[in-house]
């Protein structure tokens, strides 16, 4: 496992420059926005002196590289700035909204994998049968239906008509809140009532969020497994007289799962950034909605902080994906 | 010949491939006996059915191929009638297969030592992977793998082609191997390694009293290694003889043509190689009668009507050709 440790170290080295890149890009984008931020928020109600004061307060009178430097220093010392609109510390607001979205994304990814992988395996093992065709058709439908449509349909059917599941909002607050992720918190403090309530509230949003992803994973898994099953080394395993179950689990599935790991990681990032519509439809106060509202209000410190946070999580997820990847496939550790 | 000497007997084997274009009659009534302890060469062009015949022995014909009928006796048991679970116990244990492309045959995600150990564990020859590891290192020494202990811990991508072939050979020896089928074992490695691998196979065959079937299109290899040779053409065995006899006195027009097409280093530069005219037939619509007759310069009317059967024209020398109908007292 020596080469594995070496791989982790090298991979960590690339982490820092990537993170700096994320910061610079978010900084540039928010400063390229044609409206002067300070003006955007207050211009209509403000005299020139106040405007100059605000400019000074946000260091907007300094050259861009000083601004960038100050920004980076503040980010790493935990001072993520103050929202122009609400005048509250951004870090505090993010700590309320981000856990909600993160929880939604985790649950979404969970449903993607739990539905996508078994369906893909079933389709590959019953290749060219009715079951396979059914799964393939379903998956085409799954990823071609726009998910706002799916979300609204789910809401109509399961909440409005059938009344089986709650249709909007968060569940009951658990007894103790540690992280802001209610599902996680209710497990930690053993509040099972709150757990079930939150789970039911998140069921429709996360399933509608997961459907396109699950459809992609099912197709990918099917293709990948069929590819692997036709590989020479599977044939050779049969020649060695290994039981079919061992061939399937230890050799075919392990090889077939490699592309799934990569795609699942990318999808998780997409879920974080793409939850906006879902959060709007199901009235969930998450990061997506917070950022959209801030964008309309030109609350640029919030946009920068939010984008940075999503970028950071994305980087961490990809780091974990790369570690998993190297753990499964020894060839990766070389590169 | 005493029947006990026969380790493998293929009787009247037919294999079809059911493709969209039609039914490919890939193996068309093959009969073959392999004696215990011998080295038999199975020679023929690409696509003549040598690999398919050998894979039938393991009952691992890739779909859409299917064994239509026939019997394959191994140590007196008809393999084609065994339940799959019994067949599995024979594969990789009593009958081992050495594949053509060792690089593609090894799972890239597992250490090679683990992959050699797998059949031992699942055939119940050792208690655990830990016990198997000692055997693996021993086997690696037997196949003359340099630094066997380190190599056992290597992944396939860390080994050269020749070393991977040694891994595959070690795997083949891991069971209670009686019959070793080597399907073009040296096509994927270069010539010097080729010689080493063949020497190794020869040595192991003597040490462990194995029966070796060498599937190849390399006639030089056959001349060097084999006791007897069977030549296949378009799904049939057309000639079977002791190696020396076959090279000195080929009888079937196809085999004659095959030997005439081999360059000889002693023959000088001016000798023109003689290719066999025509093409390998399409086996969806094989020629009636003898499958070679459209390319045969000695074809007779009977060749178009009747399929020739194998006849012993000299002791141990069998041929399937109407030219020799009268020889050997053949009464039709």
Image (tube, rainbow, N blue to C red):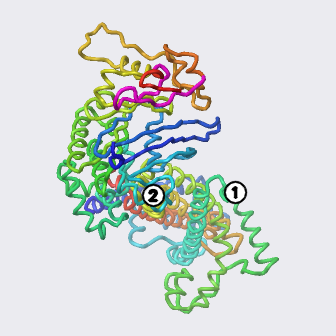
x, y (%) of residue A129?
67, 55
Q: Residues within 10 Å of mark 2 (few under 14, many from 20)?
A: some
Tag 2, which secondary structure?
Answer: helix
Image spot of residue A49 (x, y percent): 56, 65
User: x%, y% of residue A58?
Assistant: 49, 65
- Marks 2 and 1 belong to one chain: no
Query: Which residue appears at 29% of the width and 27% of the height?
Result: B220
* Label at residue A130: 1
In the image, which residues are magenta? B305-323
Q: Nearer the viewer, residue A198 or A47?
A: A198
Determine the image quadrant of residue A88: bottom right
Q: In the rendered image, which residue does mark 2 sit on? A: B87
Residue A66 can be seen, yes or no? no
Residue at the spot x=44%, y=19% of the render?
B253
Can you name the residue that lies furthest to the right here? A161
The residue shown at (71%, 70%) is: A281
């Amino acid at each position: 496992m020596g080469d594995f440790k070496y791989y982790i170290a090298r991979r960590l080295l690339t982490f820092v420059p990537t993170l700096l890149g994320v910061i610079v890009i978010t900084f540039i984008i928010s400063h390229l926005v044609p409206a002067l931020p300070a003006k955007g928020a207050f211009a209509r109600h403000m005299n020139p002196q106040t405007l100059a004061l605000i400019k000074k307060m946000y260091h907007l009178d300094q050259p861009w590289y000083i601004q960038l430097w100050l920004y980076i220093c503040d980010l790493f010392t935990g001072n993520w700035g103050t929202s122009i609109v609400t005048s509250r510390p951004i870090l505090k607001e993010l700590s309320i909204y981000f856990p909600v979205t993160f929880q939604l994304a985790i649950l979404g990814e969970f449903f993607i994998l739990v539905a996508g992988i078994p369906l893909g395996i079933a389709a590959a093992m019953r290749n060219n049968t009715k079951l396979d065709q059914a799964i393939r058709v379903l998956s085409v439908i799954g990823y071609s239906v726009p998910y706002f449509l799916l979300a609204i349909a789910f809401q109509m059917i399961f909440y409005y008509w059938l009344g089986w599941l709650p249709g909007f909002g968060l569940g009951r607050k658990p007894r103790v809140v540690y992280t802001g992720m209610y599902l996680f918190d209710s497990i930690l403090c053993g509040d099972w009532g709150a757990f079930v309530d939150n789970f039911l509230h998140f069921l429709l949003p996360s399933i509608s969020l997961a459907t396109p992803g699950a459809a992609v994973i099912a197709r990918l898994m099917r293709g990948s497994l069929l590819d692997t099953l036709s590989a020479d080394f599977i044939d050779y395993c049969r020649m060695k007289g290994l039981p079919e179950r061992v061939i399937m689990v230890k050799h075919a599935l392990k090889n077939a799962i490699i592309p799934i790991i990569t795609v699942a990681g990318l999808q998780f990032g997409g879920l974080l950034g793409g939850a906006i519509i879902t959060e709007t439809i199901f009235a969930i106060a998450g990061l997506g909605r917070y950022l959209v509202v801030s964008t309309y209000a030109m609350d640029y410190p919030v946009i920068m902080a939010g984008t940075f946070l999503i970028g950071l999580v994305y980087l961490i997820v990809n780091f974990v994906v790369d570690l998993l990847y190297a753990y499964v496939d020894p060839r990766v550790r070389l590169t | 010949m005493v029947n006990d000497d026969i380790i493998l007997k293929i009787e009247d084997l037919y294999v079809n491939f059911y493709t969209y274009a039609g039914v490919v009659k890939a193996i068309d009534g093959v009969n073959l006996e392999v004696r215990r302890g011998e080295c038999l060469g199975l020679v023929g062009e690409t696509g003549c059915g040598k690999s398919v015949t050998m894979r039938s022995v393991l009952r691992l014909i890739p779909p859409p191929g299917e064994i239509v009928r026939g019997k394959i006796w191994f140590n007196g048991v008809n393999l084609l009638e065994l339940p799959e679970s019994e067949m599995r116990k024979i594969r990789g244990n009593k009958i081992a297969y050495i594949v053509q492309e060792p690089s593609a045959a090894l799972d890239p995600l597992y250490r090679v030592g683990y992959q050699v150990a797998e059949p031992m564990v699942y055939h119940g020859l050792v208690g655990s992977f830990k016990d198997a590891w000692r055997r693996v290192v021993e086997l690696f020494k037997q196949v003359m793998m340099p630094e066997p202990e380190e190599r056992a811990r290597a992944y396939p991508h860390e080994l050269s082609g020749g070393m991977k072939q040694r891994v595959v050979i070690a795997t083949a020896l891991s069971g209670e191997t009686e019959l070793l089928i080597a399907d073009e074992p040296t096509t994927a490695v270069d010539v010097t390694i080729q010689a080493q691998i063949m020497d190794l196979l020869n040595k192991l065959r003597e040490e462990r009293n194995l029966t070796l079937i060498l599937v190849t299109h390399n006639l030089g290899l056959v001349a060097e290694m084999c006791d007897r040779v069977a030549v296949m053409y378009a799904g049939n065995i057309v000639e079977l003889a002791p190696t020396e006899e076959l090279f000195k006195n080929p009888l079937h027009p196809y085999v004659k043509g095959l030997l005439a097409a081999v360059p000889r280093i002693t023959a000088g530069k001016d000798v023109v190689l003689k290719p066999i005219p025509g093409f390998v037939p399409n086996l969806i619509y094989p020629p009636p009668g003898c499958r070679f007759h459209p390319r045969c310069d000695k074809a007779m009317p009977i060749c178009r009507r009747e399929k020739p059967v194998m006849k012993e024209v000299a002791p141990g020398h069998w041929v399937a050709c109407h030219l020799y109908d009268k020889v050997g007292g053949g009464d039709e």
